[in-house]
């Protein structure tokens, strides 16, 4: 394919309920979609979804910055590269430092366009072996325990395979205790701190060992692998890394120093689905469990995550919850649903979704098309 144009489309998606984590509360998502136009096509033949947030709170990337770096640097570089495949996107964009979420959105759009032209699925390209994947749900921080327990009971009734609780200092031991009592010992339970703790909190975090958790996710700062290694040595709860893993090298280094025994692979955070597969392969070789995390994606990203989670190394339920968990209406037809704790892997060509253009038009806040020429 020869990239000759892009569409950058901003959409505003209100959440069904606020979603609170240790770094802030969200009531809506400002999402950037990237449409890939190749060989002179007037309309996009593939779409990518950027997982960056409006503010640089989860990572250094944010939506306005992503749009700027794509238009000024990344898209012109791809156009200048001439005929390329989706597998070439990472190499062509390699000289530009960082901006993994921007790069991932472009690779995603290229994959969608290429696979649709080949009448193939992302599931087939990645090498997934399953047609259904187990679904977990991520539960935010609440103002009180009663509201938390009511929410969790609803997800148990919906049939989710595991519960993930967001935690922070002051909202950890008692909420976890109450949820474990509610769901029983047999249901999977894990916690996610989003970097809210420090090395001085290790003894406190070890108190979570009594609850039989699947893992504790990213308790310490992104760049503090040694604190994660110290916690892993002191605690019986497996330590999982999320924000700390942005590349294959970082994954390998974290394993080498004993900072993790589980990795949450988010394609947007690591630069795309092809790099995500390489990290999966490394973890399988090293005996490290992996699972697919979520970033409040629409049906575009949710479909692609299902394809990734169908790989054999994804042995833990991911954050691929039903679309209605977050959106009153998704921008795709036949949104992801959970049945008996499982999500069906999409079988349609490309990433596996079918856009609902009427809904997409209603939620669009900005739409920009620009033509690209070699050397632009």
Image (tube, grey):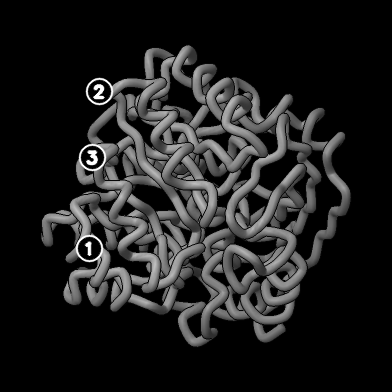
* Residue at 33% over, 65% down: 202
Q: Residue at x 24, y 77 (%)?
A: 253
Which residue matches tag 3? 315
**Residue 32 versus residue 118: which sits nearer the camera?**
32
Q: Earlier in the sequence, mark 2 or mark 3?
A: 2
Q: Position of residue 101 (x, y in %)?
A: 56, 65
Mark whose residue sits in front, 3 or 1: 1
Of labels 3 and 1, earlier in sequence is 1
Q: Is residue 221 left or right of residue 287?
A: right
Secondary element at tag 1 = helix
Q: Nearer the viewer, residue 346 or 318?
A: 318
Q: Would you call the spot at circle 2 few (<14 residues within 10 Å), some (14-19), or many (20 or more)?
A: few
Q: How dense is the environment of label 1, judged by Cα within 10 Å: few (below 14), some, or many (20 and up)?
A: many
Q: Secondary structure under badge 2?
A: loop
Give the total of numbered labels.
Answer: 3
Residue 173, x across and y down, in percent: 42, 44
- Vertical side of 170 occupied by 131: above or below: above
Give the residue number, with chain letter if any, for mark 1. Answer: 232
Reply above or below: 300 against 356.
below
Q: Residue at x 34, y 51 (%)?
A: 216
Mark 2–mark 3 Cα distance, whole angstroms, equals: 17 Å
Closer to the chain start, of discs 2 and 1, is: 2
Q: Quadrant of residue 179?
A: top left
Screen quadrant of the C terminus? bottom right
Residue at 62% across, 76% down = 74
Instruction: Determine which of the numbered discs, if any, sits on residue 186 in the image.
Output: 2
| Residue 68 sits in quarter | bottom right
Query: Quadrant location of residue 144?
Result: top right
CA separation in Å, label 3 and label 1: 20 Å
Q: Which mark is residue 60?
A: none
């Amino acid at each position: 394919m020869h990239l000759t144009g892009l569409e950058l489309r901003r959409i505003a998606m209100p959440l069904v309920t606020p979603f609170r984590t240790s770094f802030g509360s969200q009531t809506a998502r400002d999402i950037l979609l990237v449409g890939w136009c190749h060989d002179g096509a007037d309309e996009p033949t593939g779409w990518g979804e950027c997982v960056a947030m409006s503010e640089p709170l989860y990572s250094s990337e944010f939506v306005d910055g992503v749009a700027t770096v794509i238009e000024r640097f990344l898209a012109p570089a791809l156009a200048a590269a001439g005929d390329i495949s989706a597998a070439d996107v990472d190499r062509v964009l390699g000289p530009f430092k960082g901006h993994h979420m921007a790069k991932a959105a472009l690779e995603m759009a290229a994959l969608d366009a290429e696979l649709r032209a080949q009448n193939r699925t992302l599931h087939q390209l990645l090498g997934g072996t399953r047609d259904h994947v187990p679904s977990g749900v991520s539960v935010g921080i609440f103002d009180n325990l009663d509201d938390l327990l009511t929410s969790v009971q609803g997800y148990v009734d919906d049939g989710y395979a595991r519960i993930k609780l967001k935690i922070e200092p002051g909202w950890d031991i008692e909420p976890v205790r109450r949820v474990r009592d509610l769901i029983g010992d047999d249901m999977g339970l894990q916690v996610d701190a989003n970097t809210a703790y420090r090395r001085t909190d290790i003894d406190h975090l070890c108190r979570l060992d009594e609850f039989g958790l699947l893992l504790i996710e990213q308790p310490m700062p992104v760049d503090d692998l040694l604190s994660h290694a110290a916690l892993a040595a002191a605690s019986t709860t497996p330590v999982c890394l999320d924000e700390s893993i942005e590349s294959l090298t970082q994954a390998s280094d974290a394993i080498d120093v004993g900072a993790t025994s589980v990795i949450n692979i988010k394609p947007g955070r690591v630069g795309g689905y092809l790099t995500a597969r390489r990290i999966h392969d490394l973890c399988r070789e090293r005996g490290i469990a992996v699972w697919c995390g979520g970033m409040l994606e629409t049906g575009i990203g949710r479909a692609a995550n299902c394809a990734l989670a169908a790989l054999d190394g994804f042995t833990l339920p991911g954050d691929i919850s039903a679309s209605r968990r977050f959106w009153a209406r998704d921008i795709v037809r036949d949104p992801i649903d959970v049945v008996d704790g499982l999500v069906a892997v999409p079988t349609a060509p490309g990433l596996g979704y079918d856009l609902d253009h009427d809904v997409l038009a209603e939620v669009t806040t900005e739409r920009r098309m620009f033509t690209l020429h070699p050397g632009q």
